[in-house]
């Protein structure tokens, strides 16, 4: 490749995405050789174990080389591309021609042009709602609003032309007139004999599947359930203005640290590692897309209020795909909370190498036998919940699991 | 259907109600022999006599107070404020006495106060105001503001027949400028909004004279504009507003009144509260700035919302 005397070639390296991340896979190039790129504009997308992240260009210029192919995994620090900076875009200049005296390229600083991928990532309420209802990835929708904003009309237009899958198995004699539509349709969308539509699993689904299978093949998974009277928790959480989850998390942390260290642990082959501190994983559903388990590191230092704030923050950023790789690693215990969707019992799979996962189910009003101060029994309406513990029989036994759940239950029933 | 001006339609409405119900009577300053400052009541004295067309002293508190008393006693008074601006002198009688009567004593106060309102003719700060928001904020009062001759007659009749005190805003600028078909004979209009123009890209919410400015502006842009004419500010037709917003997802709210706490502020708050997930852009407002209406013609034109300023706001929202 050629370069003019005034240009500088800058190496773009795979960025360090967190202290525990040593490698990443390029999953998409947003720029090709010859494309201009603005400073901080996304040049490619990088995938690590669970988190996908954007790789911004550290300089403005023109992409001159792409050194890592899509799908290739390389170490942090590896040069993945090169960008020519200088007095202007030089690639279009013929080889060995003197560098043309071009002024600062317009619109590369600050606001990026609407046509580029650097367009506004903020969406209006109606656009977000439509994207959820129709399952549209807004990144695919060309925006025509101010600064490339995706407007409601853009989504409507996209939805109108979107169902390209049906074009392939349409009996229309005019199908040949629409080669563009057919060509842009992924071949995987061809129907099978029963009229189904093939849909390749997303990377996230594949990753979840592999991790869950690995857990079931590795751990000796058992489940234990206790019923817990949540009436006080419900009152307390209303007073605090939080969900029940942070209160449960706080109780679990206390119980783990005081009496059940073997559950705040990881098991690697024949070695159990116990932890003094609690790094708490919280499962966050991403809807149909999958789920992710961000980690609250050093959760023991946080009050219920603090836990609530962290959970909200992590969940929000998880759904916006803004988690750093470090934030989904290193959990020592996990809580999952499918009860919000109405389930009363489930058999959660342990997130190995952790040894246990606590499942908080739906709170339901039930008639239960209660005893008053004088020992009289009666039936009362109470808010009840099932606490399900998925645990690894390699690490502990059933009595230990039951005692742990009972301790958590006692703590929650005496919340005030 | 007869072609009537906005002013003639109000006049017709008064006649219709006075003929229909002998409890109905009008009172105001110079409304009898002189026919009113704008001639809305011209001819009423001859037809209905001095007992039902009463000239009164220049004392708005007295006019409104008398109306409250006669309404409780079983009559159906219609008072004319010579200019809407002067109602501030009768504020207490209307807001504290008339508006709260039902809540305090369970008594209906079926009265109408007509307010010739609005600017645009160099009337200066005392003869150009749009005071509707004051009364929207006072519980117990209804507030209506027609934009067409048909609705002027129909809403006036509805106001007279309503058991509550109703503030009837008639825009002076429309008096002789706006003409339209008005149903002859008995005609009332429900206190609900109407869609003055059907569109799909942007909703403009307006009332009174601003409906015409909005319709004018809508003609000038290359987009499908829906114009919602509120007609009634209290009760506010929330469902009509929300239905339009859900359709278009972009809203411009126009007030001729001063911006702060105007009727449009209430509309904008409603949309933010109940149509948030349908919005595809900010809720924009066009209104007069928070200053008295200047006498100087160019200054007045500069601060009143116009089809020009509405069009600019439309363009901006459409491009958003």
Image (cartoon, coloured by chain):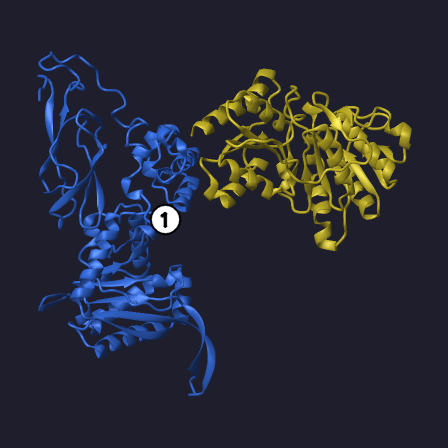
Give the drawing colour for chain A: blue
Residue A371 in percent (x, y) is at: 42, 84
Name which quarter of the figure residue A30 lies in.
Answer: top left
Side of A402 where A341 appears, left or right: right
Label tally: 1
Name which quarter of the figure residue B176 lies in.
Answer: top right
Q: Quadrant of the C terminus of chain A?
A: bottom left
Tell me: residue B188, above or below residue B224. Answer: below
Front position in the image: B297 or A26: A26
Side of A53 where B271 appears, left or right: right
Q: Disc 1 designates what residue?
A: A195
Q: Chain of mark 1?
A: A
- Secondary structure beneath label 1: loop
Residue A246 in percent (x, y) is at: 32, 62
Q: Residue at x 83, y 44 (%)?
A: B70
Residue A402 in percent (x, y) is at: 26, 77
Give the drawing colour for chain B: yellow
Front position in the image: B261 or B214: B214
Name which quarter of the figure residue A397 lies in.
Answer: bottom left
Residue B152 in percent (x, y) is at: 73, 31
Can the viewer see residue A231 in this picture?
Answer: yes
Side of B281 where B106 appears, left or right: right
How packed mark 1 is, by other alpha carbons closer than 10 Å (few <14, some 14-19, many 20 or more), is few
Side of B29 where A275 appears, left or right: left
């Amino acid at each position: 490749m050629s370069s003019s005397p005034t240009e500088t070639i800058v190496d773009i390296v795979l960025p360090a995405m967190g202290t525990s991340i040593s490698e990443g896979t390029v999953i998409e190039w947003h720029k090709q050789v010859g494309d201009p790129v603005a400073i901080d504009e996304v040049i490619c997308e990088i995938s690590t174990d669970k988190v996908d992240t954007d790789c911004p260009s550290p300089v403005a210029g023109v992409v001159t080389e792409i050194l890592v192919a899509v799908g290739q995994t390389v170490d942090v620090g590896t040069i993945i591309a090169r960008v020519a900076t200088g007095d202007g875009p030089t690639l279009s200049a013929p080889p060995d021609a003197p560098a043309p005296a071009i002024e600062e390229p317009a619109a590369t600083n600050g606001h990026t042009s609407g046509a580029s991928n650097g367009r506004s990532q903020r969406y209006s309420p109606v656009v977000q709602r439509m994207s959820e209802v129709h399952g549209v990835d807004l990144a695919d929708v060309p925006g025509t609003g101010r600064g490339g904003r995706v407007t409601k009309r853009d989504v409507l237009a996209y939805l109108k032309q979107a169902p390209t899958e049906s074009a392939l198995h349409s009996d229309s004699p005019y199908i040949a007139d629409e080669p563009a539509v057919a060509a842009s349709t992924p071949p995987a969308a061809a129907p099978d004999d029963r009229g189904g539509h093939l849909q390749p699993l997303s990377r996230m689904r594949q990753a979840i599947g592999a991790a869950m299978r690995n857990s079931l093949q590795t751990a000796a998974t058992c489940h234990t359930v206790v019923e817990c009277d949540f009436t006080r928790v419900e009152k307390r959480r209303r007073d605090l203005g939080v969900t029940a989850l942070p209160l449960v998390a706080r109780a679990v942390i206390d119980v783990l640290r005081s009496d059940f260290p073997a559950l705040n642990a990881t098991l690697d082959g024949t070695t159990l590692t116990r932890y003094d501190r609690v790094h708490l994983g919280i499962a966050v559903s991403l809807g149909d897309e999958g789920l992710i388990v961000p980690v609250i590191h050093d959760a023991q230092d946080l009050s219920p209020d603090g836990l609530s704030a962290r959970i909200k923050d992590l969940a929000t950023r998880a759904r916006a795909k803004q988690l750093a790789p470090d934030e989904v690693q290193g959990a020592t215990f996990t809580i999952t909370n499918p009860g919000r969707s109405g389930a009363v019992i489930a058999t959660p799979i342990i997130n190995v190498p952790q040894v246990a996962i606590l499942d908080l189910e739906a709170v339901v009003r039930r008639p239960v036998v209660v005893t008053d101060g004088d020992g009289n029994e009666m039936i009362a309406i109470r808010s009840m919940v099932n606490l399900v513990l998925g645990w690894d029989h390699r690490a502990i036994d059933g009595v230990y699991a039951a005692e742990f759940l009972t301790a958590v239950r006692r703590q929650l029933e005496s919340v005030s | 259907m007869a072609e009537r001006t906005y002013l003639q339609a109000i006049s017709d409405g008064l006649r219709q109600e006075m003929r229909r119900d002998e409890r109905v009577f009008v009172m105001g300053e110079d409304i009898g022999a002189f026919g009113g400052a704008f001639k809305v009541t011209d001819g009423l004295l001859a037809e209905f006599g001095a007992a039902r067309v009463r000239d009164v002293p220049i004392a708005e508190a007295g006019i409104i107070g008398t109306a409250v008393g006669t309404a409780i006693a079983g009559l159906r008074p219609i008072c004319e404020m010579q200019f809407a601006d002067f109602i501030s002198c009768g504020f207490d009688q209307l807001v504290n006495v008339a508006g709260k009567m039902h809540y305090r004593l369970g008594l209906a106060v079926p009265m109408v106060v007509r307010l010739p309102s609005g600017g645009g003719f160099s009337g200066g700060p005392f003869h150009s105001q749009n005071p509707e928001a004051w009364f929207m904020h006072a519980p117990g009062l209804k507030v209506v503001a027609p934009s067409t001759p048909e609705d002027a007659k129909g809403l006036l009749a509805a106001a007279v027949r309503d058991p509550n005190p109703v503030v009837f805003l008639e825009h002076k600028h429309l008096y002789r400028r706006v003409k339209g078909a008005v149903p002859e004979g008995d005609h009332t209009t429900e206190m609900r909004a109407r869609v003055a123009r059907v569109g799909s890209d942007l909703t403009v919410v307006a009332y009174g004279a601003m409906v015409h400015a909005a319709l004018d502006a809508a003609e000038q842009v290359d987009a499908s504009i829906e114009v919602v004419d509120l007609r009634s500010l209290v009760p506010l037709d929330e469902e009509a507003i929300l239905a339009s917003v859900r359709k278009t997802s972009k809203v411009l709210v126009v007030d001729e009144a001063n911006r702060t706490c105007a009727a449009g502020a209430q509309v904008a708050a409603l949309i933010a509260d109940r149509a948030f997930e349908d919005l595809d852009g900010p809720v924009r407002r066009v209104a007069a700035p928070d200053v008295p209406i200047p006498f100087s013609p160019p200054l007045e034109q500069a601060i009143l919302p116009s089809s020009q300023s509405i069009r600019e706001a439309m363009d901006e929202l459409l491009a958003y």
